[in-house]
Image (cartoon, rainbow, N blue to C red):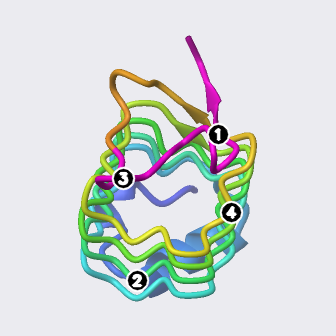
């Protein structure tokens, strides 16, 4: 039996559920948690609230972060290659050293920090 997303209230529960093979975490609410260095490659985190979370060095390669709230999240050094960032709120996130090559974004709906250039970072526009 898979654990409902509503029952995942800690980083430990998220990682245990991921390790058990689950990848669907859409609408997860888990803000201000320590997820530094975690491997959530390929996870569906669309519409998730991970605001204020520490995701430094996290493996989010190929993850679906569409419409996720990553405000105030620290994604320094995170691997986001091939991730879906359509409508994602990254406006106040820290992206220092994050690898964003081939991540998909919407130039109208994805919100980046001031001065961030998605083209220079290697992202690809879905429009």
Q: Magenta part mainly helix, strand or loop?
A: loop
Stretch of the chain drawn in magenta: 112-127
Q: What label sits on residue 99 in the rendered view?
A: 4
Q: What label sits on residue 115 in the rendered view?
A: 3
Toward the viewer: 25 or 62? Answer: 62
Dot 3: element:
loop
Point 56% across, 45% down: residue: 44
Determine whether label 4 and label 2 are within 8 Å by CB: no
**Which residue does the numbered mark 1 point to in the structure image?**
123
Residue 37 position within the rendered picture, expressed as x and y whole percent measured from the top left: 62, 86
Toward the viewer: 69 or 119? Answer: 119
Q: What label sits on residue 54 in the rendered view?
A: 2
In space, the residues marked 2 and 3 are separated at their CA atoms by: 22 Å
Q: What label sits on residue 107 in the rendered view?
A: none
Residue 45 vs residue 51: left or right?
Answer: right
Crowd around label 1: few <14 · some 14–19 · many ≥20 (10 Å): many
In front: label 3 or label 1: 3
In space, the residues marked 4 and 2 are separated at their CA atoms by: 16 Å
Instruction: From this view, report whether residue 35 is shown above or below residue 62.
Output: below
In space, the residues marked 1 and 4 are separated at their CA atoms by: 9 Å
In space, the residues marked 3 and 1 are separated at their CA atoms by: 15 Å
């Amino acid at each position: 039996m898979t654990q409902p997303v509503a029952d995942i209230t800690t980083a430990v529960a998220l990682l245990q559920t991921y390790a058990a093979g689950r990848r669907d975490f859409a609408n997860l609410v888990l803000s201000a948690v320590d997820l530094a260095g975690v491997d959530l490659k390929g996870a569906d985190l669309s519409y998730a609230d991970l605001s204020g979370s520490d995701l430094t060095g996290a493996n989010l390669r190929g993850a679906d972060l569409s419409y996720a709230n990553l405000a105030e999240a620290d994604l320094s050094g995170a691997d986001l290659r091939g991730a879906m960032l359509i409508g994602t709120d990254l406006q106040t996130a820290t992206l220092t050293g994050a690898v964003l090559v081939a991540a998909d974004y919407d130039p109208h709906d994805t919100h980046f920090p001031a001065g961030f250039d998605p083209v220079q970072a290697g992202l690809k526009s879905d429009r």
